[in-house]
Image (cartoon, rainbow, N blue to C red):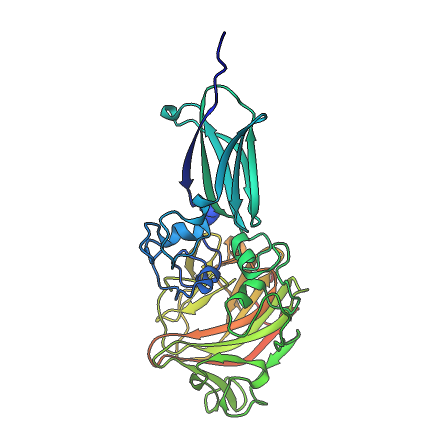
């Protein structure tokens, strides 16, 4: 009598960070999600290759696995949460799939050929998932891959795992409907992306000529939000027009001033302002992952814009720059439908294509709608002056080329 061969199940475990398995919301640029870091009390300065708890797993691996990087565990929870059992229908491979993370089960009949077949791929939801293999003869090996996350489907600045950690919807960029994207609120103090807050949002069209502001600290005036508010002032003496302007001064730390807008239903936005940059800097090594557009002026007075399509800084095509000690007009056209933008200096289009056709830059990061202006000054005692800021749904006059 022939004996029926039994299936021999071997299990291999692989932990692969796929291309889109890295964090979407990563302001510090270390490759680890800011939402994940906040959950475990990390600062964002830790290296992705560091092993904070000494258990043999790097921070990047623990992020992809969804495990706690501060608690030593030589067998992370993913390894502890799978079982392989034999039954009448074949082998059942069961494992816990953490919310927002992708997994694949693969099998091979010959390890020497390194030939693997995909059995199933799933997106975790914090429940047990199973794969049943009906093969009954021979030897077979299995491996479970942790593939990382799904990309940011709703352009709110959160990938699938970050949405799960923040408790937000993967198909809605503004889960609480308060006018600010989930990704922005997920890392801001006193903000909750799943609870409608009391943010002051300006409606379009909006104009700030600074004359109605009170001299002194800018923070809190007309909805302005400023970090380190002593470095952001409403002042008289340096203004493009009228008597008052806004002065941002970086002392020991950078200064950031922001203004929030209710632009969720608007696909095309124009921003027009007067700016006096003073001392300038160089290409930022890291561009914030929530920024759709970014510009700065060089020491020679040339504007440089970050093109998200090529992921490079592009300098204007003018034959001569603008004196860094003089006011200049900046105008932006933000196309949220096309995820692209234009910028003008003193009414002249920056980097136009041959024949004067507008050459759109791509957004640095996908963005669902217009919701904020952000001005930042870095470098000891560097200053920036602002005046006559217009945010509107139609183009201002005086531009040389229209889209």
Q: Which residue is pictured at 56% across the width and 56% down the height?
A: 164
Q: Residue furthest right?
A: 265
> In which quarter of the view is residue 123 placed?
top right
| In this picture, residue 342 sits left or right of residue 70 | right
Q: Is residue 125 visible?
A: yes
| In this picture, residue 200 sits left or right of residue 68 | right
In the depicted view, which residue is nearer to us: 289 or 14? Answer: 14
Q: Which residue is pictured at 56% across the width and 57% down the height?
A: 163
Picture coordinates of residue 96, whole percent (x, y): 52, 45
Q: Which residue is pictured at 39% across the width and 27% down the height?
A: 114
Picture coordinates of residue 275, whole percent (x, y): 48, 77
In the depicted view, which residue is nearer to us: 116 or 374? Answer: 116
Q: How many marks?
A: 0
In the depicted view, which residue is nearer to us: 130 or 213? Answer: 130
On screen, residue 213 above or below 361 = below
Picture coordinates of residue 173, whole percent (x, y): 61, 60
Query: Considering the image in quadrants, where does the C terminus appear?
Result: bottom right
Picture coordinates of residue 183, whole percent (x, y): 54, 63
Q: Is residue 397 visible?
A: no
On screen, residue 300 above or below 131 = below
């Amino acid at each position: 009598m022939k004996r029926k061969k039994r299936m021999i199940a071997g299990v291999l475990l692989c932990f692969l960070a796929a291309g889109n398995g890295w964090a979407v919301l990563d302001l510090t640029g270390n490759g680890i999600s800011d939402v994940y870091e906040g959950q475990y009390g990390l600062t964002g300065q830790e290296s992705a290759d560091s092993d904070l708890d000494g258990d043999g797993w790097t921070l990047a691996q623990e992020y992809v696995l969804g495990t706690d990087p501060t608690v030593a565990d030589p067998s992370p929870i993913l390894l502890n949460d799978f079982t392989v059992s034999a039954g009448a229908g074949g082998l059942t491979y069961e494992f816990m799939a953490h919310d927002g993370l992708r997994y694949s089960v693969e099998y091979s009949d010959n390890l020497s050929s390194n030939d693997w077949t995909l059995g199933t791929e799933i997106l975790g939801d914090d429940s047990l998932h199973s794969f049943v293999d009906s093969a009954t003869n021979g030897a077979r090996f299995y491996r479970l891959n942790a593939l990382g996350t799904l990309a940011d489907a709703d352009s709110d600045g959160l990938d699938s795992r970050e949405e799960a950690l923040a408790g937000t919807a993967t198909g809605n960029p503004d889960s609480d409907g308060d006018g600010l994207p989930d990704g922005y609120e997920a890392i801001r103090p006193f903000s909750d992306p799943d609870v409608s807050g009391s943010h002051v949002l300006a409606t379009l069209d909006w104009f700030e000529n600074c004359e109605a502001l009170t001299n002194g600290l800018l923070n809190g005036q007309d909805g302005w939000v400023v970090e380190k508010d002593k470095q952001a002032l409403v002042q008289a003496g340096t203004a493009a027009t009228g008597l008052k302007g806004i002065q941002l001064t970086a002392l020991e730390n950078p200064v950031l001033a922001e203004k929030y807008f209710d632009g969720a239903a608007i696909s095309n936005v124009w921003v027009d302002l007067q700016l006096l940059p003073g001392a300038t800097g160089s290409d930022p090594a890291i561009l914030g992952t929530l920024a759709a557009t970014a510009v700065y002026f060089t020491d020679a007075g040339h504007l440089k814009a970050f093109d998200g399509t090529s992921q490079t800084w592009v300098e204007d095509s003018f034959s001569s720059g603008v004196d860094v000690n003089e006011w200049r007009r900046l105008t932006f056209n933000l196309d949220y439908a096309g995820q692209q933008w234009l910028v003008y200096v003193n009414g002249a289009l920056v980097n136009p294509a041959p024949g004067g056709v507008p050459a759109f830059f791509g957004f640095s990061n996908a963005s669902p709608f217009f919701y904020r202006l952000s001005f930042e000054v870095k470098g000891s005692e560097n200053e920036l002056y602002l005046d006559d800021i217009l945010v509107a749904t139609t183009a201002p006059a005086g531009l040389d080329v229209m889209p």
